[in-house]
Structure formats: structure tokens, C-alpha cells
Image (cartoon, rainbow, N blue to C red):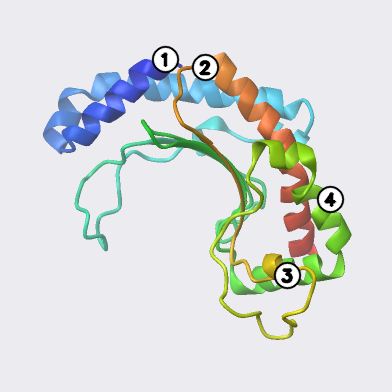
Amino acid sequence: MRIPALFQFLSDLKAHNSKEWFDANRKDYQLLRDEFLIFISDVLIDLGKFDDRFSAMNASKCIFRINRDIRFSKNKDPYKINFGMNLNLSGSKEFFCGLYLHLEPENTFFAGGTYLPPPAILQSIRQEIDYNPTDFKKIVESKKFLNVFEGITGDSLSRPPKGYDVDNEMINYIKLKSFIAEKRFSTLDITSNQLKDRVVEYTKLIMPLNNFLLTANNH
């Protein structure tokens, strides 16, 4: 994957976000997309070496369409200005829990966890954190985890959810509506192989969090 070429294409797309421009540059997009699919396939091979769930994933199903859904959006730009890799471990369209890589000039990041899970699953996650505070803190407050990620992020309730006391030692986690670990890249002047290695490294740190969230959903 030619990261400089990808970022140049995305910068140009941002400046000329129209069907006419995209059609004129469709061959460049298709080539870059094919390269990104190869990158994802390589990532899945490396991840599959320590977790079989990744080996079963199809790279073509882990990439987002470039077209935006503008039906209910004030922003009528027809195309997204990023490439994204989405590895969902939950096996559900309603509940995402897994890994996400977002490639965009000046806004590139890698993340894992779950974003706004459905109410019933959110309740189960909160209950699991309440029942197993030590296990959860070992994951998200370990030095290795915090050396890469700035803890757990996500929108939070202003008050404790029903059934939880404000004095609960885990209340700041229990109040969260999403459970995300994120690593942002200020610049991305690295090669495709270097990026792949970072994704694999960060995945190994995030997987205990993902497994905790998935276990909560299965209880």
C-alpha cells in the first residue's frame, strides 16, 4: 500500500468531492483500493497467527464503501475522504466489537472496543465491570496499555445509571456509553509494513478488552 499516494488521492478527493472528479480518477481509486485490500489481507494473516477468529475473516468484507449515504445528512458530498478497515469480532451487525483503522490525512487513528452498543448489551457490559472490577482494571490500567492508549474513551452519562451507586469504585467506567481504546497518529510517514506491524502490536494490547466486552455479552 502506497501511503503517500493514498493520502494525496484523499486530499484531492476532499478538495474535489464530486462525481465528475471521481469518475475521472476512478482508475487511481481502484488501484489504491486493491492495494488496501492486500494490506488488510496481510494484517489478517498476521493476526490469525495468535487468534483464529481473524483467519476466518474476508478482507473484502472488512473495507467500507467510498460512497457516502447522504439521504439523511446535511453534508451532500458524495464520497468519504478516508479509507477504513473494520474487523468485527461480535458476528453481529447490531453490536460491533473489534478493531478499526481509519486512514485520512491529518486524522489517522487505530481503535478497538465497542462504540454505542445496544442498550441490553451495554447493561451487560456494565454489570460485568461491576462484578469483575479487578479483571477489568488489569486490562485498561496496565502500564503497557496506558503507554499506547490514553485509557478508555467514550461518551459518558452525567449521573450513574439506574441500579449503580455514585460511590461505586468503577462508576466512571460504568457511566460510559462506549468503551474505546484509541491510538492517534499525528503524521503517517511510515511504510505499509511498518503500519501493519503497529496494527498487530496494538491489537495484542486491545484484544483483552475486546474479549472482556464479548464475554459480557455472552453472559
C-beta proximity under 8 Å, tags 1 and 2? yes
Question: Which labelled disc corresponds to residue 2?
Answer: 1
Q: Amino acid at mark 1?
A: Arg
Residue farthest to the bottom?
162
For label 4, count other residues whose C-alpha is less than 10 Å away and answer few (under 14), some (14-19) or many (20+).
Answer: few
What is the C-alpha distance between the residues marked 3 and 1? 42 Å
Q: How many residues crowd around disc 2 within 10 Å: few (fewer than 14), some, or many (20 or more)?
A: some
Identified at 15% across, 38% down, the residue is 18
Residue position for label 2? 192
Q: Disc 3 marks which amino acid?
A: Arg
> Which residue, given by chain and number where applicable, does mark 3 sit on?
126
Measure the alpha-carbon separation of dots 4 and 2: 32 Å
Mark 4 or 1, nearer chain start = 1
Question: Label 1 near label 3: C-beta < 8 Å?
Answer: no
Of residue 79 and residue 191, the one placed in the foreground of this image is 191
Query: Can residue 171 be seen from the camera position used here?
Result: yes
Classed neighbour count for the residue bearing mark 3: other residues with Cα under 10 Å, few (<14), some (14–19), many (≥20) = many
Alpha carbon separation for disc pair 1 and 2:
7 Å
Q: Badge 4 is on which residue?
A: 138
| C-alpha span from label 3 to label 4 | 16 Å
In 3D space, how far apart are the residues under numbered discs 3 and 2 (Cα atoms)? 37 Å
Q: Mark 3: which secondary structure?
A: helix
Q: Amino acid at mark 4?
A: Lys
